[in-house]
Amino acid sequence: MTADVFIRERPDQLATGPRTLALFPGQGSQRPGMAAWITDYPVAEEVFRRADDILGIPLTQLCVDGTAEQLRATDVAQPAIVATSLALSAVRAQQGLTPAAVAGHSLGEFTALAVAGALDEDTVLRLVRRRGELMAEVSRRYDGAMSAVIGLAAEQVDALCVQVTSGVVGVANYNQPTQTVVSGAAGAVADLEELARAAGAAKVVRLRVAGAFHSPLMGEIAEEFGAELDRSELHAPRIPLLSAVTADYVTDPTEIRALLRGQLLAPVRWVETVQRAAADGYDELVELGPGQVLTGFSRRIVPDLGSTAISTPAQSG
């Protein structure tokens, strides 16, 4: 049976016009069976075939039949998510549906760069594989953690982080007006969780991730990853690219390299990014990748802005 790649949550407003902003998700969006649909779309199969060849790992098999545990490994999850998003983008492009601009959440910025023509897809796949390896290595050396604080304003969470003196902890993701993710040393994150509960947080959820991403604990790999970026050929994006590091557009390859290196330590400013998109007149956000996380975030940030998830069928059984 042919898989239905497109989940059209608002079919009457599905973006095909000139003001579509494509969104690409980051780590955590992976799920079993997220590429089970590709046999119905040769252009998508080609993306995965090339990824298998470039990376030297059975990425297609992992994205079709891999377990949740296998896909959780940082050095697998990152290329898996990017390849899935690139495959979906290839299908849309073949159908004549191209975005006016792009943005990505953390890892998703690499996909955005490929779709915008700033990096070729082969280079992006190599970079995210290496990024995942480096992040996994540093995570094994440090006892890091991440936690989502729900029900407090971001400013409150910022202030609570300052109060923690037991170790490094800070905001990693400004995902929604009242959902903020913190990252840092495990003990410091635990202390922050207690402060958040005492301050009236509706919920505090420890994330199932391998390390303290977007925190100073990632600092020691920034230089090595920066060297990988320096060896990679970058071009000015062919379409506008809205960075979630700065909530602003980037066009200069040197600036893009600096942002990709800096995002290892810097928070993801997703709230500001979506607000900027709305202010700039984009009338539809289209998420391309496994899951619908960014669609949910965006609807809570700017409820009147059309948001559509284009995902993949979940693996049954």
Image (cartoon, helix red, strand yellow):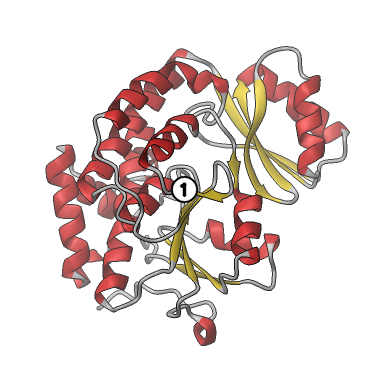
The residue labelled by disc 1 is 250
Which residue is outermost to the left?
53
- Left or right of residue 236: residue 53: left
> x, y percentage for residue 247?
59, 48
Q: Residue at x 69, y 62 (%)?
A: 300
> Which of 52/317 is in front?
52
From the top left corner, tell me how far across and down residue 306 is, in percent.
Answer: 59, 74
Would you say residue 174 is visible in this rendering? yes
Residue most extreme to the right: 199
Horizontal and vertical percent position of residue 308? 52, 71
Q: Quadrant of the N terminus?
A: bottom left
Quadrant position of residue 64: bottom left
Residue drawn at x 74%, y 30% is 193
Residue in the picture at 56% in, 49% down: 248
* Frontmost residue, 299 versus 247: 247
State left or right for residue 88 relative to residue 212.
left
Residue at x 55%, y 57% (from the top left corner):
294
Task: Identify the secondary structure beneath mark 1.
Answer: loop
